[in-house]
Amino acid sequence: MLRLTDIHKSYRVGPTTVDVLKGISLMVEQGELLSIIGPSGSGKSTLMNIMGLLEQPSAGTYTVGETKITYDDDRTLSSLRNRMIGFVFQQYHLLPRLTAIDNVGLPLIYRGIDEKEIAERSTEYIKKVEMQERSHHKPMELSGGQQQRIAIARALVGSPAIILADEPTGALDTHTGQEIMNLFKRLNEEEGITIVVITHDPKIAAQCKRKVELRDGIITG
Amino acid sequence: MIIKANIKEALKSLITAKQRTILALIGIVIGIGSVIGMVSIGTIVQNEALKQFRDMGIDIVSVTKDYEDQGGDKGFSIDDIYSLPDYSPLIKKVAPYIISSTQYSYMGQDLYIELMGVDESFFDLNKLYVREGRLLSDLDRDRFFCVIGAETADMLRRVGIRKLIGGQFLFGDRIYTVVGILKDLPEGGGMRPSGINRSAITHISTALRAFTTNDITTFMARVNTQDSKTVKDVIENYFNKKARGLRVRVRTAEELITQMQKQMQLFTLLLGAIGSIALIVGGIGVMNVMLISVTERRKEIGIRRALGAQRNDIETQFIIESVTLCFVGGIIGIIMGIVISYVFAHFSKWEFLISQSAIVLGFGVATAVGVFFGYYPARSASRLDPATALRE
């Protein structure tokens, strides 16, 4: 499904070069529930950006499905992001002006799907995260847990190959965070959706089927 | 495809940032408003000038002695002028006239007056009508009667003269009895000799005897064709060969109209250019607002890119927002421009008209300003690095 081979990433900060990822090789198979755990500064956010096609690695190869990523064409990259990847962020990142249901439908707009179908699919996925009661509320009117559910529906609506969740419970209290994890587990078990959870919390990581530990830019376990 | 969603989004985002949107709108409204106002006023002025030609008809020519070619003072002989219609069927009617400026003094005040000598057909050709009294006819030959222009009448009343019709006035060195007062004529343009409003007009036969200068240097004619070239040739040939070898200059209404239209186009262009400066300033305001909008929405741009928006989609979104802004400003600006030109026409007592081309121009320009000044902010939005934008 996803295959990272010897991925390096370094940033230039003034005159010095900072190596954030120092040769990451990782495979994510269809139907996995995988956690990537590491302390802050271990490079896990950079790794997720690379996996999510938001950043280009300095060296190494990355294959999504059958496609080897070449990073030379914005159109192809955007299209891959749109079809293959669903993001869930720590800060939810919903658009404040749009209602919950319009936020859910956002990825489909960039596919050129007609309005009626977008509305149907958004409704379907908002039900899946049990938020249909709140579909016409603005994000500001929702609690953190509710916003995260909307964000998950938005990540799922385009039927991507994989969900990339960056600290999805980081901004939530323990109870709500657990609800979100339960939702992930249910989606993974019942629908076979591939999910990668990036976290620094061992309790979250422990709930995933597989765990990858990242430290100082390399996989340690 | 996503245009409709973009317009909806653009409106929402513009409404959210009310203050900023209103500031940018004011700039655009003033810009488009001044362009439309200026162009409309130009059109109204042009229409007004042409109207005087429409009033008199465009079958009028004015023939003047060519001073450059002949050093002597001799003007036209009145008989030569009157036999012109017999010479060519193209000439229907002729109206010779002479003008001699004078001052009329009354109780120590000097009034500047144009003394004119004309014949009966002059009133017909120039569409002159009386407000009071009567016009002169050829029966007034050799008599010291006159009609006075509207402004002359006003001036005389202002210095305290009550009795105008039937009153006797010393114009030049002769005393004339006023028999009529002409209606007020619009200023400028057309084929009419200027100064009729400020005139005292007597019969040409009287004038030839009484005026200090009695050379006829100009006459008007109504002609039978609209082919100005033939008419010109006929008149020039007539005076060149049949008469005394006099060189003449013939000006047709058609020529004057063409000349005036050129001037008016230049005038409208100039007004439009003045308006455009306001528009550029407005456009820069839009660009400023769009740049701020892009800066404030870096995170939104990052989110959209993460969800699969291409650079093109982001660029389109911001250009549509800028065009929407300018379009709304354009509508208000067009209304404002029309109101301005209406007020202008109203106070100038000119015929108001809405220039359709100005409206089309207004929308076109508004859209162009939106695209032009929205392009740079939209482009910088689309170039944002999504990972950086999301981290903020």
Image (cartoon, coloured by chain):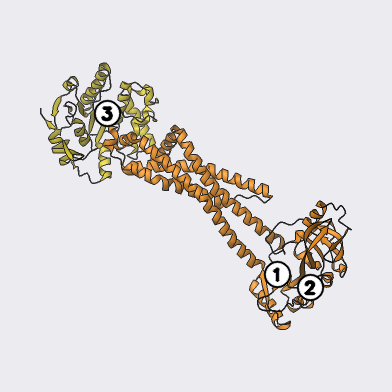
Chain colours: A yellow, B orange
Of circles 1 and 2, which is in front? 2
Q: Of marks 1 and 2, which one's residue comes earlier in the chain? A: 1
Asked if disc 3 and disc 1 are in contact, CB closer than 8 Å, the reply is: no
User: In this rendering, is residue B102 above or below B78?
Assistant: above
Q: In which quarter of the image is the C terminus of chain B?
A: top left
**Figure disc tally:** 3
Asked if disc 1 and disc 2 are in contact, CB closer than 8 Å, the reply is: no
- The one nearer the camera, B358 or A129, is B358
Residue beneath the point at 13% across and 30% down: A216
Mark 2 vs mark 3: tell me if same chain: no
**How far separated are the C-alphas under marks 3 and 1?**
85 Å
At which x and y percent is residue B104?
81, 60
Residue flagged by tag 2: what amino acid is it? Asn
Report which residue position mark 1 lands on.
B62
Relative placement, left or right, of B6 versus B217 is left
Residue B214, disc? 2
- The chain ID associated with circle 3 is A
Mark 1 vs mark 2: tell me if same chain: yes
Q: Can residue A107 be seen in this view?
A: no
Residue flagged by tag 1: what amino acid is it? Ser
- The one nearer the camera, B235 or B68, is B68
At which x and y percent is residue B316?
37, 43
User: In this rendering, is residue B105 above or below A175?
Assistant: below
Provide the secondary structure element on which disc 2 rests: loop
**How far separated are the C-alphas under marks 1 and 2?**
19 Å
